[in-house]
Amino acid sequence: MARRPLPRILRSGSASITRSREIARTAADNATDVLHPLITVSRGLRKLAAAGRARWAAMPKERRGPTLFLAAAGVLVVALLPYGPLLALISLMAAAAWKGRERPVERTGPDEVETARLRALYEALVPYFSVPDDPSPLFSHGGEWSGAFSDFAFDADGRPTRLRIAYPAYFPDGDPVSRARIEHVLHAKCGRGREYLFDWDEEGNRLVMCVLPALPVSVAAQRFVTVPGETVLGFTDADAVQRTVPVRDGEETRDAPAVVWRTGPRATEPHLLVVGQPGSGVSTLLRSIALQALLHDGDVLVLEGCGSGEYACLSGRDGVLGVECGPVGALNALEWAVRATERRLAVAHEARQAGRTAPAELRRPLWILLDRLGVLGDLAAAEGRPDPQELLQVPLRHGRAAYVTVVVGEQFDTVDALGASVRAHTRAHVALGAATPEQLEEVLGAPPHTTPPPQVPPGRGYVRLGTDPVLRLQVPATPDPYDDEAPEPHRRAVLDLLAVRPAEPPAPAPPLPASEPALPA
């Protein structure tokens, strides 16, 4: 049977049909643009009429008569006024246009991907927040997550950035092990590679989890706005401290939340212990402290155990009493520091008994910075010399009254070599670099409320001053200015601070009853 040809309209009319559809669609779009004001006003009139009918239906019957009378009186007054009907029509059209405008759609809840993630997180928490004997469990398999989760927020990838969790009252939220288990589950389910903060409200049985932004690492060493006796250890989160200091961050100046450590006779934590891994920024923090002490007219004595020359830039500077790298020089310097502390203590005691203020020479603080104290002890023991920690007990015990501050830098591998006296008197603790939760708790005395960061830059860690909460910390970039691998702006900032000289020499102090022993060469 011969195949019959298709009609002409089906063989050659497809292009014309497509072109006709495009013309019709373009005409419809143009008509919509032209008639958009009319559509908006019509929509507004419809909404105003619906609102009027709803209000009339909700009005009591005894009030409808007076309302109609007042409306008729108002229409009569408008009609009698000059240009009254025209003004009334313009007002009505303006109200309708405002009422009928298109408003952006606001999200009132999570989408499908976010809902699935919340449901999975809810199911993962069921074994930890439920018991078989609970008659109405808040967490149950197949239950509703909306009763337990609130105040949630998500990032562009659909991962939670903030979440408030309500948990049952029988959960042991005072147990650190139980808390760590819940935090581990939330960290794994909400997405790794971010730093989380967990805020436990034991009184209200609420847990708030939020993602913390990375602390800036671009702040270099500079002269901070502080008074003598205050040292900026670094910077932390904005809601963690109440004080900010102006800093230069590149080309701009901003206020940054600073962790300020106070020293002197009225300080509650007069000495500092810094622990970290190799390359974590322990030497950076000690250099930053030394520069700030020199800017406040303090005397600095540096004792380095590893002999790497990290503090060679301080040699010969105004206010630097010495930089010792060997056990012989370190022990001699510590013996001098012991005699200087005893002399300062005696002068302060005589001044208090006589009712006088402390002399200006005594009020000039003395800073003793020891990097790798455990290595110094091992070297001294190998040469048959006394342990430096025994000599350090006098500055540690009487340093607050004698204006003497001790800063000890050590590594996690050798922190156990520190004696009980050093640990007892250094009540301000800093832990830098990558470390396990057990190591952080051993150094700080309490576990941090945040998860470890995915990447640990130099100078990044945690700080705890006495019994205060554990805070995140980013030390100002203070590299060795003689290190060619350090960034040039940061090296230049350190050299500029080392070149600072006091504006005028301090006033000569009155003669003291005993002469201060000279620092051995």
Image (cartoon, rainbow, N blue to C red):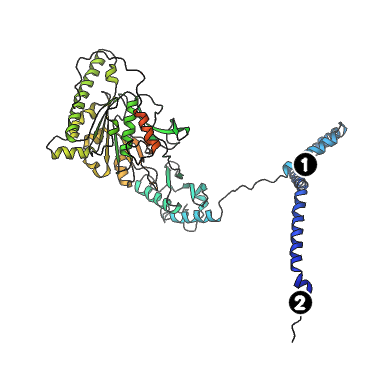
User: Which is closer to the viewer, label 2 or label 1?
Assistant: 2
Which amino acid type is marked by label 2?
Answer: Leu
Spot occupied by residue 120 in the image (x, y as percentages of width and height): 48, 56
Residue at the image position 75 percent from the left and 45 percent from the top: 44
Inspect this view and state whether residue 62 appears.
no
Disc on the earlier residue, 2 or 1: 2
Q: Nearer the viewer, residue 488 or 363?
A: 488
In the figure, residue 55 lies in which quadrant? top right
Quadrant into which the N terminus falls: bottom right
Residue found at x 25% / y 15%: 351
Q: Residues within 10 Å of mark 2 (few under 14, many from 20)?
A: few
Where the C terminus falls, by quadrant?
top left
Mark 1: which amino acid?
Answer: Lys
Residue 61: mark: 1
Farthest residue to the front: give it.
484
Judge whether 357 appears above or below 136 on screen: above
Is residue 234 found left or right of 19 in the rendered image? left
> Residue 469's quadrant in the figure?
top left
Does any portion of residue 64 appear in the rendered image?
yes
Residue 12, percent from left and from top: 76, 71
**Residue 211: image tag:** none
* Above or below, 8 relative to 296: below
Residue 161 drawn at (x, y percent): 48, 47
Query: Secondary structure beneath disc 2?
Result: loop
Foreground of the two, 147 or 49:
49
Mark 2, residue position: 6
Count of number-bearing discs: 2
Q: Disc 2 to disc 1, how far (Cα)?
A: 72 Å
Q: Residue at x 27, y 18 (%)?
A: 361
